[in-house]
Amino acid sequence: MPADSTNDPVHALVPHSPGRPIEGAANGPLAGRSFMIKDMFAVEGLKVSNGNPGFYEIAEPANETAPAVQALLDAGATLTGSTICDEFFYSLLGDNAHYGAPINPRAKDRHTGGSSCGAAAAVAARMCDFALGADTGGSVRIPASFCGLYGLRPTFARISLDGATPMAPRFDTAGFFARDAKLFREVGNVLLDERRVEGAIGQLIVVEDMFDQADPRIVEAIGHALAHVGDKLPPAEPRRIVGEAIEPWREAFRILQGHEIQETLLPAIEKHGLKLGPGIKERFEMASKITDEEADEAQKVREKATMRLQAQAQPGNIMAIPTAPTLPPKRDEAEGEATARFRKLTLQATCLAGHAGLPQITIPAGEVDGCPVGLSFIGWHGGDEALLDLAVKLAG
């Protein structure tokens, strides 16, 4: 039976979440399962807010349901709620000045991570079996790591984003969360398109650069996790892949994302004078000032990053990195130097798969100070299924 979502113990749902479940097909691979969606995916007859109540007021009800949502319904899953996201998806924290911050069930004094914060909190709190989110700069991977879940950022464009609000279309992906590896794999079977690229995992590359920038306690926890499942993985080969390029890669991602926002989200915000929360307002002001020349230079950096990463991500190769280099920020911590450092380090980790359009899976890998820690594997283009199969193998 679908999970009971009549209450909201972790403040995961938006106020305009559907008042009753939308039943899925009677039969299908996900029959009897329940899911929730990030407040950006269209459902026929309903409106989205993208994390901003002013946008909700001016929005029109959708004429049809987003294909990814419809695919899950057709597979038998029942839609039971729409979840809070960071305002216009422009944060990695998991907070919203208008709707509040969902509670992280696994570390209640810490943030969930964002921007798919409510979706992750709902799955971790067992309000639903799995959830559909979206990942541009880490918005599925980071909350999955912080909430102790499985999460996938797929190969770019392998899951339809039609009917979802665009942010930065050259980076945007649909992703999903689950607590259970086998269900996680089943959801992938439903959502991923036919562009699968076969390859047996034969090489594990440990990206030393990414471990070097992570909290040593996180590195230790991941080391224990890798040792525990070592017999299920190919021998590990440490490599330095990014080096001194990491900050230029992060900055290029920031610039390109902001430049695309000038054409996706910013026009509606400016036209309707939508009120933005602290931090988000400043980011949109920053994005509005990015020049075409800056974006052109950033694109050159992205192309170099993509070439370097794709040279490593040949079919059969996977790269291991810490999903998040820091622990989740504390809920009572005000915006400031600490949260700015969190965003900087986190984007340095998440921009790899983002630049190259590669699939990245995060799996639970223990705890540090009561906070879940995620271990990520980056695969090859079209190698999403191999990563999902690996998650099942490691959990077994």
Image (tube, grey):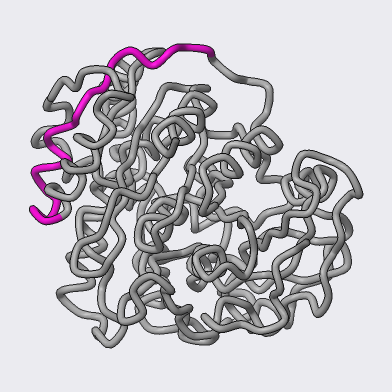
Q: Is residue 215 magenta?
A: yes
Viewer-nearest residue: 335 or 180: 180
Q: Quadrant of residue 378?
A: top left
Assign the N terminus to one quadrant of the image.
bottom right
Pinpoint residue 26: horizontal percent, then vertical percent.
91, 49
Locate residue 38 relative to residue 295 in the image: left or right.
right
- Residue at image position (19%, 22%) is 236
Which residues are drawn in magenta?
Answer: 198-217
| Residue 346 drawn above or below residue 247 | below
The tally of labels here is 0
| Residue 48 drawn above or below residue 278 | above
Pinpoint residue 289: horizontal percent, then vertical percent.
36, 62
Q: Quadrant of residue 330?
A: bottom left
Viewer-nearest residue: 228 or 217: 228
| Residue 173 drawn above or below residue 93 | above
- Residue at image position (48%, 81%) is 276
- Residue at image position (78%, 43%) is 71
Locate residue 9 relative to residue 229 in the image: left or right.
right
* Extreme residue in the front direction: 396
Pinpoint residue 115: horizontal percent, then vertical percent.
46, 64
Q: Tell me, yes or no, if residue 294 can be seen here.
A: no
Assign the C terminus to one quadrant of the image.
top left
